[in-house]
Amino acid sequence: MQRLPPFSYEPARSVAEAVALLSKYGADAMPVSGGTDLYANMKQRLFAPKVLVGLRPIRALRFIAYDDARGLEIGALATVRDLAESEIVAARYPALARAASSISTPQLRAMGTVGGNLCLDTRCNYYNQNLDWRAALGFCLKNGADICRVAAGSRTCLAVNASDLAPVLQAFGAAVHLAGSGGERALDIAQFFTDDGRNALARDAREILVKIALPPAQPGTRSAYRKLRQRASFDFPLLGVASVVWLDGAGVCRDARVVLNALGPRPVEALEAAQCLIGTRLEPEALAIAADAAYKVGKPMENAGTTLAYRKRMLRVFTRRTLEDIAGVGAPA
Ligand SMILES: Cc1cc2nc3c(=O)[nH]c(=O)nc-3n(C[C@H](O)[C@H](O)[C@H](O)COP(=O)(O)OP(=O)(O)OC[C@H]3O[C@@H](n4cnc5c(N)ncnc54)[C@H](O)[C@@H]3O)c2cc1C
Ligand code: SF4
């Protein structure tokens, strides 16, 4: 049995209190929301914080609100289940509801939060192992050694962003709001993630994520999310494909975004794939060309389940299926 390392728990009752506690304890502290990811990682000794700052008591951060002018706002403490079951989200941002309902299990969705999901640690076959396993191998860049086991020549960690919500939120053009001792700041979600899995978030350790804001849903917006995983019952994504398409009144695509995830430390926008859709009526040929473009841009590494070759092949298949869902011709997932 794996046991948690010793730590003390300091509940925060407000954002200001959480920020003050994180500043007080510095590198010794981490925030915890649902704990569904953090506690498992602590058991594997990936982290051993002396203090956990509990965010769950901050009830004001558990909300989902929609306004035609402001758009959708999701408090960081809204649970993944809140998101999956929200009628507003299902009606206006269906890909988000779909991604939320594909996350882990009902129990974990009830505990896990949207903020925790976006702040997930990156994952890799050589990292998400217990201490003895990693020590026997001699560790890797993400554990303080000087080599990446996936790509020996790499100077950065290539571990993957395994959040199902991140690519969908990026496709919708979301902003994340962070609170720190200097006040609140908003960042485009694409800038929230970095290229190095060792330090994969543009978040200061003393800041907490408080809110995610999405632009208002315009008429003619369609969205979809597909996820490749080993077990259909529950599993992290081996590949995630999110797309949002904006159609004009005549059904012609006037803008599009395609975002791929679980390939590296940050979601990757397939710009050329999106360009291939603009000006079309999402005819099958257009979807196939866009899927080819996504295939070219996605570069999986040998660091997640199955093989690199299979994940690479599935890039084209899953992009096409995602776009077929948007075009209304997709087979059930
Ligand atoms: C078996 C299993 C299967 C899973 N499957 C999936 C899956 O399919 N898809 C998926 O996306 N996820 C999956 N997860 C991961 C996890 O359950 C979810 O991502 C969940 O939403 C994490 O939220 P949490 O509140 O529990 O995060 P926590 O565990 O509390 O925290 C996760 C990380 O985020 C930080 N953090 C938490 N809240 C904040 C905040 N507000 N501000 C700043 N930092 C914060 C913590 O310090 C920690 O580093 C799985 C987990 C398990 C154990
Ligand atoms: S990608 Fe490389 S450095 Fe990063 S966790 Fe995996 S083996 Fe370690």
Image (spheres, grey):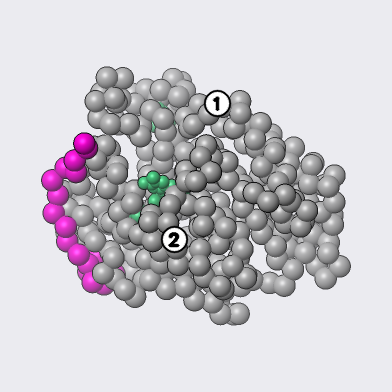
The residue that appears at 19% across and 43% down in the rendered structure is: 4
Mark 1 or mark 2: name the one nearer the start of the chain: 2
Mark 1 CB lies closer than 8 A to ligand 2: no
The residue that appears at 77% across and 56% down in the rendered structure is: 327
Where residue 250 appears, as percent x and y from the top left, is 86, 67
What residue is disc 1 on? Answer: 307
Where residue 228 appears, as percent x and y from the top left, is 58, 41
Instruction: Establish if 220 lies above or below 280.
Output: below
Mark 2 CB lies closer than 8 A to ligand 1: yes
Instruction: Identify the image quadrant of the N terminus.
Output: top left
Residue 76 visible somewhere in the drawing: no
Classify mark 1: helix, strand or loop: loop
Residue 52 visible somewhere in the drawing: yes
Quadrant of the rendered structure where residue 229 is?
A: top right
CA distance separating discs 1 and 2: 29 Å
Where residue 150 appears, as percent x and y from the top left, is 45, 24
The residue that appears at 28% across and 65% down in the rendered structure is: 56
Of all residues, the one furthest to the front in this rendering is 233
Return the residue nearer the eye: 1 or 222. 1
Quadrant of the rendered structure where residue 131 is?
A: top left
Q: Is residue 16 magenta?
A: yes
Range of magenta residues: 1-20
Instruction: Establish if 265 lies above or below 183.
Output: above
